[in-house]
Image (cartoon, helix red, strand yellow):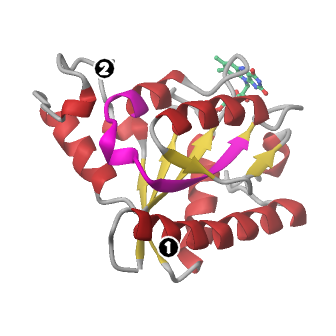
Amino acid sequence: MYNLKIINSTVRPSRKGPIITEWIAEVAHQHSEFNVEVLDLAQINLPMMNEPAHPRLKQYEHEHTKQWSAKIEEADAFIFITAEYDHSYPAPLKNALEYLVQEWGYKAAGIVSYGGVSAGTRAATSLKTDLIALKVVPLFEAVNIPFFDQFINDEAEFVPNESTQRAAQLMLTELVRWTKGMLVIRGKEI
Ligand SMILES: Cc1cc2nc3c(=O)[nH]c(=O)nc-3n(C[C@H](O)[C@H](O)[C@H](O)COP(=O)(O)O)c2cc1C
């Protein structure tokens, strides 16, 4: 079993992100290769980056950073769920990424984006650029959900159409493959 951390991007009251996060977490859970944990940035509640030392030194002063570091360290792979805010990905996720360096590296990531006509693809593209700087390998296969509101029912559940379901399965299949590859690169047992 590989440790998959699913990380959302939005923290505002009334956000829709958790609805989509819950759906992809369930799909990932059905992939028996993954031990799934959702890391909700609203609950984790990191302050704006307040560590004095450069994160690559891992000289963390604050308990919140040590806990965040431990969670990311134990990950073998990630799925990021990103909304699109002003044509990019939301600030809480950028802040959470910037807290750490080495813990992210040589691990693969799938991206689920949601938005209006753009399906959050501009956010996903910005996120990919930043992930590369942290040596995270973002997958080509992705889930991009346009006008996502129409797939949320009265019970606040995400009900994907066929193409979204297929995209999720493809992304997870590729994520398993890349996770195995990254284990070799990190010098770990497959
Ligand atoms: C600050 C802000 C900026 C937004 N910018 C965009 C945008 O650039 N593109 C887009 O498709 N939707 C945009 N939206 C609409 C979001 O797609 C929609 O509100 C979505 O629910 C945001 O995710 P959340 O509910 O998890 O916060 C924006 C929403 C907010 C609150």
Q: How many marks?
A: 2
Residue at image point 71% right, 55% down: 158
Magenta region: which residues? 97-113
For the point 75% across and 35% down, the residue is 120
On the rendered structure, is 40 left or right of 54? right
Label 2 Cα crowd, 10 Å radius (few <14 / some 14-19 / many 20+) = some
Kindly identify the amino acid type of the residue bearing the numbered disc 1: Lys
- Identify which amino acid the numbered label 2 is placed on: Met
Question: Is residue 3 visible to the viewer in this orientation of the structure?
Answer: no
Above/below status of 72 relative to 11: below
Residue at mark 1: 180
Q: Quadrant of residue 124?
A: top right
Which residue is drawn at the image coordinates 50% and 80% (left, top)? 33
For ligand 1, give the image quadrant: top right
Residue placed under numbered mark 2 in the picture = 49
Q: In this orientation, which residue lies closer to the viewer: 175 or 165?
A: 175
Location of residue 88 in the rendering, given as x and y in whole percent from the top left corner = 67, 23
Above/below status of 45 relative to 165: above
Can residue 99 be seen by looking at this rendering?
yes
Q: Is residue 89 above or below residue 38?
A: above
Q: Which residue lies furthest to the bottom in this view?
A: 32
In this view, the mark in front (2 or 1): 1
